[in-house]
């Protein structure tokens, strides 16, 4: 690359383009007149001091866009080789991506299958509990007993209001009802269904959490 022929370079600032440059900052890649150099020093303080070339003879400074043909050739060769290597790497990464995509899909399907089976079993056990409770509730059928008692109470109320007993049917019906026995049946005991205790539930939950 040929050096710049004009030793007296001008300031890079457009409005100072007729003013001779007093320095050059290799970091900024700018020529500066005395005034611009002052602002440059204030703006960057001491950060760019090591990049400054303070001389009015810049024949060893090459323009930004001027690159030595030999260096250019080396750069082209490097970029070509790097590009080929990068393409090869990317092709390998694509193959790896296909592999892990399949692994990911298989894992997701397996996890879904496992937890579907668990949910199905949980739902089945839940249904069995609920059905058993409903059966026992229907067996007790207290609503029917209450309605029958209310009908009997209304009959008694009517008889007591009229003060006349025409036959012994109502008396016999009352005598056949064992009220004391009905009181001590402890219907709630029929709902003594064994379900998992809190500690067992926590243990199951912890085991599920431990899958990860």
Image: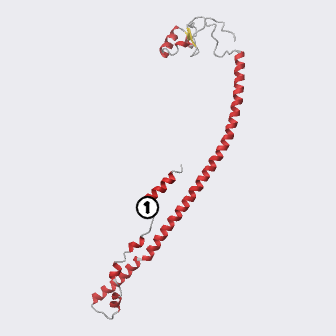
Residue picked out by circle 1: 197
* Residue depicted at 60% across the width and 56% down the height: 113
Classify residue 43 as left or right of residue 93: left
Please tell me whether residue 18 is drawn above or below residue 82 in the rendered image. above
Please tell me whether residue 162 is drawn above or below residue 182 in the rendered image. below
Residue 164 % position (x, y): 28, 92
* Residue depicted at 43% across the width and 58% down the height: 199
Residue 7 falls in image quadrant: top right
**For numbered disc 1, what is the local secondary structure?**
loop
> Residue 161 or 186: which is nearer the viewer?
186
For the image, the number of numbered tags is 1
* Residue depicted at 45% across the width and 62% down the height: 196
The colour scheme is: secondary structure
Classify residue 95 as left or right of residue 43: right
Residue 114 % position (x, y): 58, 56
> Residue 182 or 192: which is nearer the viewer?
192
Residue 50 falls in image quadrant: top right
> Residue 89 or 54: which is nearer the viewer?
89
Q: Residues within 10 Å of mark 1 (few under 14, many from 20)?
A: few
Classify residue 102 as left or right of residue 14: right
> Residue 69 or 199: which is nearer the viewer?
199
Residue 170 % position (x, y): 34, 90
Location of the N terminus by quadrant is top right
Please tell me whether residue 5 is drawn above or below residue 174 in the rendered image. above
Residue 151 % position (x, y): 36, 83
């Amino acid at each position: 690359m040929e050096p710049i022929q004009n030793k007296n370079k001008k300031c890079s600032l457009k409005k100072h383009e007729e003013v001779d440059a007093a320095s050059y900052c290799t970091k900024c890649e700018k020529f500066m007149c005395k005034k611009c150099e002052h602002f440059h020093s204030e703006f960057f303080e001491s950060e760019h001091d090591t990049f400054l070339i303070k001389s009015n003879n810049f024949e060893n400074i090459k323009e930004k866009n001027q690159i030595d043909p030999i260096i250019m050739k080396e750069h082209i060769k490097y970029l070509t080789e790097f590009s080929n290597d990068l393409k090869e790497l990317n092709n390998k990464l694509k193959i790896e991506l296909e592999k892990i995509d399949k692994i990911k899909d298989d894992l997701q399907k397996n996890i879904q299958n496992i937890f579907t089976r668990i949910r199905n079993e949980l739902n089945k056990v839940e249904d069995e509990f609920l059905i058993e409770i409903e059966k026992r509730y229907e067996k007790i059928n207290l609503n029917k007993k209450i309605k029958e008692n209310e009908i009997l109470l209304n009959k008694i109320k009517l008889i007591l209001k009229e003060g006349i007993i025409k036959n012994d049917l109502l008396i016999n019906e009352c005598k056949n009802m064992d009220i004391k026995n009905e009181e001590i049946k402890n219907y709630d005991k029929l709902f003594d269904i064994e379900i998992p205790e809190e500690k067992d539930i926590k243990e199951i939950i912890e085991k599920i959490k431990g899958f990860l």
